[in-house]
Amino acid sequence: MKYKYLSLKLTCAQCRLLGEAWRRLRVGSQPKDVTYNMLGLGFPSEYRPVVDAGLMAPSFRAETPRIMGWYKLTEVGRAIIRQMVRKHGYKSCYDTPEVDSIVKVRVSA
């Protein structure tokens, strides 16, 4: 299934990983900047959909198979996150708005 966001057609996996980056931006009392380097933590195979699409990139080193690493947003990924923030705002991580149009998972307290 594909989702249209910022004139891009995103897959469910891409939306899930971008949703996780958005959640990490909102964790804590103060929102972080979209240029924050540690917005995704996972294996290269898990982040392959967003890396191949140019939405995220490795933060600190080249990807190594079967070793977890941190990922950051690219310019296109930052634009999508900024649009998500404009639409939903920065609220507490525990007061997550429904984002069914972006990620087909509803997070509640």
Image: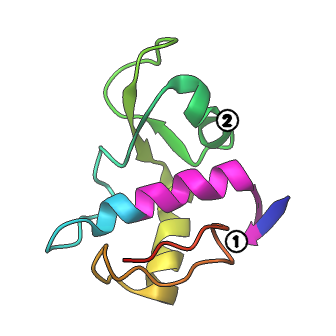
Circle nearer the N terminus (1, 2): 1
Can residue 53 be seen at all in this image of the molecule? Answer: yes
Q: Label 2's element?
A: helix
Q: Amino acid at mark 1?
A: Tyr
- From what the image shows, is residue 70 above or below residue 96? above
Counting from the top left corner in percent of width and height, residue 56 is at: 51, 44
Instruction: Give the residue number, with chain letter if any, for mark 2.
Output: 52
Which residue is situated farthest in the front direction here? 109
- Who is closer to the viewer here, 107 or 99? 107
Within 10 angstroms of label 1, few (less than 14), some, or many (20 or more) residues? some
Query: What is the magenta range?
Result: 4-22
- x%, y% of residue 7? 75, 71
What residue is pinned by disc 1? 5
SS at mark 1? strand
Q: Residue at x 35, y 20 (%)?
A: 61
**Foreground residue among 109 and 65:** 109
Q: Can residue 34 be seen here?
A: no
Counting other residues with Cα less than 10 Å from the Cα at mark 2, is it few (<14), some (14-19), or many (20 or more)?
few
Q: CA distance from mark 1 to mark 2?
A: 17 Å
